[in-house]
Image (cartoon, rainbow, N blue to C red):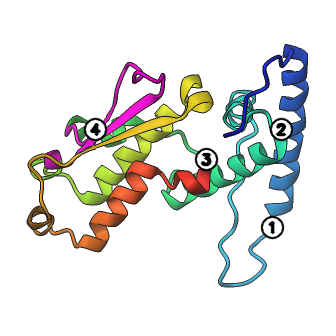
Amino acid sequence: MREQPTCLHPEQAAALSRQLARMIEASNAGKAGPAQHPSEEAIPPAPSTPGFVRCCLRAQKYEVGRALQLATNYAHFRARNGWGGASVRAAALRRELRSGLNLLLPYPDAEGNVVLTQTMRRMLHSGCALEGLQRAGYYLLHRALQRRTAQERGLALVLDFRGFSLAHLYAVRCSPCSFSRLLLLTCSFSLAHLF
């Protein structure tokens, strides 16, 4: 595991933030044109706002190259989920968030990690589409990753399968493949791709 710099002076952090913002803007400018090949999708621009840049730097222990990759991966994630440049809003996912399937706990675990939970049995009677529940999971993960603690320490993902079985997948018209996708994408947020 990479160690966070022990004494990063605020001026050093500001200089790294400016450097990363310039790199993101240059990368975005290079992607501004249409896709090179008809089968390629246009690559979305990554945000270069000061707050986002600081989040990326913290998450990657102030390694600028890795922080740039994180910003690019984040832009791809948002595009894949249809969020584009617009803000992600809880109001659009109110019913799914109220189902209780996905929860972002208000306090960290014993190790200091931000905690996300998924209680699978709540999917059964939510009355929500699987895609909506998945988007709610993405939304909460997006919110969790805005917390400084999550950027510096990481996340704890807790899956609760009590009262839920493979037979329940068919009750919600979900194939095992779709369910796996729900778990992998919602819970892990493609964390391997993001970080």
Task: Tell me the distance, in whole angstroms, between the alpha carbons under discs 2 and 1.
Answer: 20 Å
Q: Specify whether residue 11 is painted magenta.
A: no
From the viewer's perspective, tell me whether residue 7 is left or right of residue 131. right
Amino acid type of the residue that numbered disc 3 sits on in the rendered structure? Gly
Task: Tell me the distance, in whole angstroms, between the alpha carbons under discs 4 and 2.
Answer: 33 Å
Residue drawn at x 20%, y 68% is: 174
**Which residue lies under the disc numbered 3?**
85
**Which residue lies under the disc numbered 2?**
21
- Where residue 24 appears, as percent x and y from the top left, is 81, 46
- Where residue 75 appears, as percent x and y from the top left, is 64, 52
The residue segment tinted magenta is 99-122
**Which residue lies under the disc numbered 4?**
97
Against 45, residue 60 (above or below) is above
Query: Which marked residue is nearer to the observer: mark 2 or mark 1?
Result: 2
Amino acid type of the residue that numbered disc 4 sits on in the rendered structure? Leu
N-terminal of the pair, mark 4 or mark 2, is: 2
- Where residue 19 appears, as percent x and y from the top left, is 90, 36
Q: Can you tell which quarter of the image residue 92 is in? A: top left
N-terminal of the pair, mark 2 or mark 1, is: 2
N-terminal of the pair, mark 4 or mark 1, is: 1
**Which residue lies under the disc numbered 1?**
33
N-terminal of the pair, mark 1 or mark 3, is: 1
Amino acid type of the residue that numbered disc 1 sits on in the rendered structure? Gly
Task: Tell me the distance, in whole angstroms, between the alpha carbons under discs 1 and 3.
Answer: 17 Å
Task: Tell me the distance, in whole angstroms, between the alpha carbons under discs 3 and 4.
Answer: 22 Å
